[in-house]
Amino acid sequence: MTAADPYDELVAALAGRRLAVLTGAGVSTDSGIPDYRGPDSPPRTPMTYQQFVGDEAFRRHYWARNHVGWRRVGATRPNEGHRALVRLEARGVVVGVITQNVDLLHEQAGSRNVIDLHGRYDRVVCLGCGQLIARAELAARLDDLNPGFDQDVADAETAPDADAVIEETSHFVVADCEVCGGMLKPEIVYFGETVPRERVDRAYAMVDAADALLVAGSSLTVQSGLRFVRHAASTGKPVAIVNRGETRGDRYAAVTVHAGTSETLAALDARL
């Protein structure tokens, strides 16, 4: 890449091709949502599915954090990276977006063909009967059970996955399913949980329908995203990776750019 234009190699690899785009937390950092593994991110230990379903204290701790964090995620807005992908899709350059994020910012920006690989923060599912409810509906119940809780922790740090960093949660009261009394869980794929097969198959089909795969803002640390990079490379499709640091997929990439996603996606929008 030349000093004059760091995007020349990236544009050359993608020009004239229809792109599937895989996005991670780095796409949303410019909207104020922190990522998990960026160069400047503090160490985080996400709750696993096994902890959530197997330990009441872990579950209570999660819901207390989520009760604060989900509203903050809901108040965020798409950034220039999201909007650039919308414009590229409108011109037929992007065939669709596979996102590892649960913040729905791609949809808010106007992207039409989006696969929310890890679920979405605005819905809750009962693990007993399968009932789906809106997160806003549950919030009203949690407000009644825990009056003033969100004001008591107003200075909490927002965390990924519609979460917040809160230490003291032992007094938080968790709500159960109103239909069957079962355990409620955000409709988000936790660490240690499997992405639904139908969703994975749709994502593979999106990659197959494209001529190249662009990864934006993901370290590809977890297999759920890395598998699409491996699949694209195995079928001879060029892979381009834009991320602020190294990724597990760099070995499969035709080109890697260590840069922020907002400015890079805007540059691609201007040149593809």
Image (tube, rainbow, N blue to C red):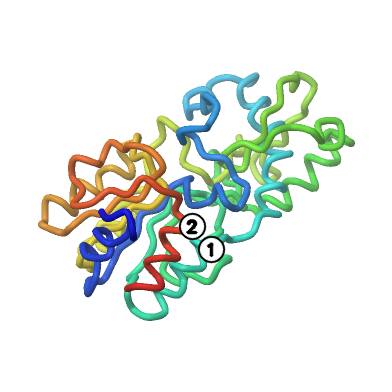
Q: Nearer the viewer, residue 216 or 198?
A: 216
Q: Which numbered disc covers residue 80?
A: 1
For the N terminus, which image quadrant? bottom left
* 128 relative position to 251: left or right: right
Q: Is residue 206 above or below residue 120?
A: below
Where disc 2 sits, the SS reads helix
Query: Toward which corner of the image does residue 113 lie, by quadrant?
Result: bottom left
* Amino acid type indicated by mark 2: Ser
Q: Is residue 213 above or below residue 253?
A: below
Where disc 1 sits, the SS reads helix
At 75% from the left edge and 46% from the top edge, which residue is drawn?
Answer: 139
How far apart are the alpha carbons under marks 1 and 2? Answer: 5 Å
User: Where residue 264 appears, x then y in whole percent?
Assistant: 41, 58
Q: Nearer the viewer, residue 168 or 253?
A: 253
Count residues near mark 2 (Cα–Cα under 10 Å), then give few for <14, some for 14-19, many for 20+. many
Q: Nearer the viewer, residue 193 or 33?
A: 33
Please, which residue is most extreme toward the right here?
148
For marks 1 and 2 on the same chain, the one whose residue lies earlier in the sequence = 1
Are the residues flagged by discs 1 and 2 in contact, CB closer than 8 Å?
A: yes
Q: Which residue is mark 2?
A: 262
* 180 relative position to 261: left or right: right
User: Where residue 236 appears, x then y in whole percent?
Assistant: 10, 57
At 67% from the left edge and 29% from the top edge, which residue is drawn?
Answer: 165
User: Where residue 93 appears, x then y in whole percent?
Assistant: 32, 74
Query: Toward which corner of the image does residue 271 lie, by quadrant?
Result: bottom left
User: Where residue 149 appears, x then y in whole percent?
Assistant: 84, 33
* Amino acid type indicated by mark 1: Glu
At 42% from the left edge and 79% from the top edge, which residue is drawn?
Answer: 90
Q: Is residue 183 above or below residue 259?
A: above
Please, which residue is most extreme toward the front here?
4
At 66% from the left edge and 54% from the top edge, which residue is drawn?
Answer: 76
Count residues near mark 1 (Cα–Cα under 10 Å), then give few for <14, some for 14-19, many for 20+. some
